[in-house]
Amino acid sequence: MSGSYLARRFGSALFTIVLIILVNFILFRALPGSPERVILRGTPNVTPAQLEAARERWGLNDPVFPDQFVAFLGATVSGDLGYSFVARGQTVGQVLGQRIWPTVILFGLGELVAIVLGLALGAYSGWRRGGPVDVVGNGLSLVLYSTPYFLLGMALLLVFATGLRWFPTFGMLTAGADYPDIWARLGDFGAHLVLPLATVGLGLVGQYAIVMRSSIVETLSEDYVTTARGMGLREGRILRHHALPNALLPTVSLIAINLGYVVAGAITVEVVFNWPGLGTLAVEALTARDYPVLQGVFLLLSVSVVLANLVADLVYGVLDPRVRT
Amino acid sequence: MTAAGASWSPPIPAGRRAGRFDLLFRLIRRPEGAFGVLILATFAALALAPELFVGPLQTAVTAHGTRLSPPSAAFPLGTDELRRDMLNLTVHGARVSMAIGLLATLVTVFIGAVVGIVSGFVGGRVDAVLMRITDFFLVIPTFVLALILTPIIRDLVGSGSTEILGIRMTLIVIVIVIGITSWSSTARIIRSQTLSLKARAFVDRARVIGAGSGHIMRRHILPNVINLIVANAVLVFAGAVLTETTLSFVGLGDPFQPSWGQLLEAARSVGAPGLGAWWYFVPPGVCIVLVVFAFTLVGGALDDLLNPKRRGRG
Amino acid sequence: MTVAARSAAVGREARALPRLAVPGAPLLEVDDLKTHFRLAGEVVRAVDGVTFRLDAGEALGIAGESGCGKTTTALSLVKLLPANASIVGGAIRLYGIDLATRSETAIRRYRWREISIVFQGAMNALNPVARVRDQIAEPIVERLGIDARAARRRAGELLELVGIPRARGSAYPHELSGGMRQRAMIAMALACDPAIVIGDEPTTALDVMVQAQILDLLERLRERLGLSLILITHDLSVIAETCDRVLIMYAGWVAEEGPVAQVFGRPRHPYTQKLLAAFPNIQADRRTLDVIPGSPPDLRMPPPGCRFAPRCPLAMAICTEVVPPEVTFQDRVRVACHLYPPGSPGEPVPVPADVTVGPA
């Protein structure tokens, strides 16, 4: 892969991240209540000297642009996101740190499951177009696409947790439980994970299946697939070596573009199942008007999406030799 | 097929209205188009005059059922925790959800179309800057941005009970926020079409005559992107309804003017799924799914109609 | 010795016949082939009774306007028709083995090893994400069972054979020029050493200089490898230069067929004459181009009788009623036209043309 392709992608991602921090900065300045609340809140007995020192550190005595922005930029990059309005004495960074792993696990696994299942389903539907899998799958996918994730979650909760009692109804672990060993703990964790994971997975599978299906259908009508058939190659080989590598290209792009929207769904799924991740944190912070934490969540999620897009770009570069020049 | 001029319809001379209704008729002739339009028309009727169907919106004061009771003869969709009739709430919810969706769509499409046309037509540095901004909004999770902006703008606007078009200010703020965060895909689509129109002869002809840029954009480009805007607006509407629902679900709705999303939020906070009170969240949920599904069908059918290259595929 | 004869000699030496081959059968015989499309509930009779023969070492050109069925005929030969098309009648006999009636799996063994095809516009006919060398090696590995390394070596040899430096084999299709892509496609078509190569408009997308090179290459390959060619094109000059015999198709059926010198020198069928007249001649006196008025018939409801009758300046009453029979004359030209009924001496009847000679 050529250096200039890499450089362009990295540069673009970096620029977007700076813009994200800029948005955060504007909000920081525009928030009801002075910026001092953000940088000092929760610290008891602040002396005027400490206040002045903090103001100095954050550059609040300097002109807004570019000095304050640069200071803000520096602070953000070094992890200093100010103090939570609500969680006494805790920095935003600390608050985020406590809630990040449940989200990563839920969301990461959900995406993985959805990508594998969705691409497989879509490829098969496109290959056997008009067949039973295709027709049923397509219909289901369309309906799932119109359903907000949290609604799906609530329905699953109702049926499988309340109704059938197969799974617990909320949280990540049973409250106050005592685990004899690591396996019991993992088991309980897994039981709690199933329904939210299923929700995220189902919500995503439909989209990926639809995209992959239409991609495969389009690829199968290309001349090189006709040539491959003309060569007498076996259908399985044609699908694997000719159709799939080409069909994956637009699919990868669309998965990446989709990520921003998926985040919204992930937040709400956490709320439904009371999963202690960034999503529930965001809603709690919203209710309590804890703006610094909200901005922290925005920063974290946005930067993650940008980085994920970057990874997708790089993957695309590996898959498609035409963009590498 | 030649590379140039692969666009959809012959240019409409400035001043003559595009035949929008003929598109509607062609749409209805397709089964998925007819089905979608039927659903949308039903919900539009409910949304325009909910009192006609279920009477005025029940409040905690006027409610007369028992708390969280399942569907019965008196209350076909059961009751909520404030003893209100779910059918009443759901039908009134249609008005709120659809109204917000419509207003948000207007704002989104307006911003998107303006940005798209100006960017595509003027080109150069303006285009580069506008596209950079557009790409930014396409990448970031706009929902989270909406999440932050809404309370901030609400606090700025103040909480009165002024209403615009019968919608409370708290919800108008949601309209604005959705508009601010959702315009980018519309802008991209409109810009593409503007670029291909710009390359066509009739624009050059107008320029030779001495028409100014604003005039060309308004009288020549706009009529030819209207069809595209309409098709895009349908899908934007679906997205706006979903976004409003989700924003309400996380607590930004208005309990005094409950949309479907707000009803779902109430259901969750009462713990309806855990209590087995399916009637609380299934009716508004089904309505959402139906409406979004219908919009998606119609939007897809319109897209097929306007883009003949896609016909015969799939 | 003609190119065809030399080619045939090499072919006999180089190639083993397939197991089911009928001894003494000609290389390829197409007998009354009918291929129909189903489009929006209607049947389009794209190929409606085409007969011809290809002998070892020969180069046959199939010419005609767009939509006359030449590509459909070619695709029928290798059974690469789209889903809505099917062969509804006739026979395609390769060494006497009828391919038309056999199933997809049964004829798979003949694909590429006996007949291969080169498409027009090689950009889409080459997999954009695979290296050229690997694409050429693929049929060698999959169909001939040769190991990957040997196959890549053979692919390199084939590239040299078509005039591409071996090192370029590691390139991707988008990195090659149009002419080189076409050559690569030809190399790919030769991978399993087939008896017949079909070229569907192989030079249409190329400029004239490159076109000449490709045609020259095909001719040399013919001689060296003992190949037989079927060239599908609307460009008569390509056929004139490269082919031994020519088949003129119109609206799904054969108008005239025979040795190139005869058909182009003494055209009999009015359509052939019009076709030749419509072709600009760079050396002739300046004159207005002779255009054939009207357009080809709708193949969902072809006209009764001769399909060219509605546009034919010499049409008679019988032409719109009876399908003209195919008659072969002494100079080995076959014509389907009522002007040349069975038993007639077969003197070409000139078609009146709108000719204005002189400076335009």
Image: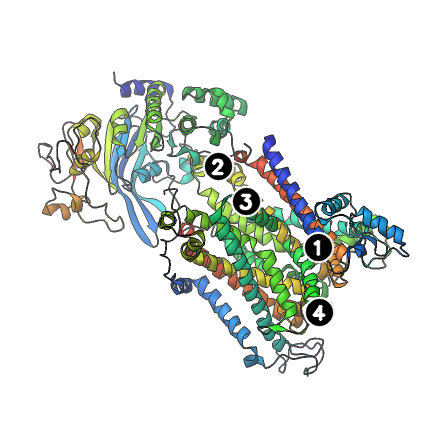
Which tag, 2 or 1, sits closer to the chain's start? 1
Q: Residue A257, how many percent across, how many down?
A: 59, 48
Query: Residue B181: which disc?
Result: none
Q: Nearer the viewer, mark 2 or mark 4?
A: 4
What residue sits right under mark 2 in the picture? A234
Which percent across, then down, holds residue B211? Answer: 39, 52
* Left or right side of C42 for B264: right
Q: Which residues are magenta?
A: B79-83
Dot 4 lies on which element?
helix
- Proximity of marks 3 and 2: CB atoms separated by less than 8 Å: no
What secondary structure prevails in the magenta region?
Answer: loop
Chain letter for mark 2, please.
A
Tell me if C118 is positioned left or right of A313 in this view.
left
Q: Are marks 3 and 2 on the same chain?
A: no
User: Does residue A276 belong to the magenta stretch?
Assistant: no
- Tell me if B169 is positioned left or right of C19 in this view: right
Find residue B128 and name its label.
3
Q: Residues within 10 Å of mark 3 (few under 14, many from 20)?
A: few
Tell me the amino acid under the disc marked 3. Answer: Ala
Kindly identify which residue carries mark 4.
B272
Callout 1 amino acid: Leu
Could you give the CA–CA distance between mark 4 and mark 3, rounded to whole angstroms?
50 Å
Dividing the image into 4 quarters, which one contains the C terminus of chain A?
top right
Q: Measure the alpha-carbon separation of dots 3 and 1.
A: 25 Å
Badge 4 crowding class, 10 Å Cα cut-off, few under 14, some 14 to 19, many 20 or more, is: many
Measure the C-alpha gap from mark 2 to mark 1: 59 Å
What residue is drawn where x is 69% and y is 50%? Answer: A301
Tell me which amino acid carries mark 2.
Answer: Arg
Give the residue pinned by disc 1: A27
Numbered disc in front, either 1 or 4: 1
Between A63 and A265, the residue placed more toward the observer is A63
| Alpha carbon separation for disc pair 3 and 2 | 48 Å
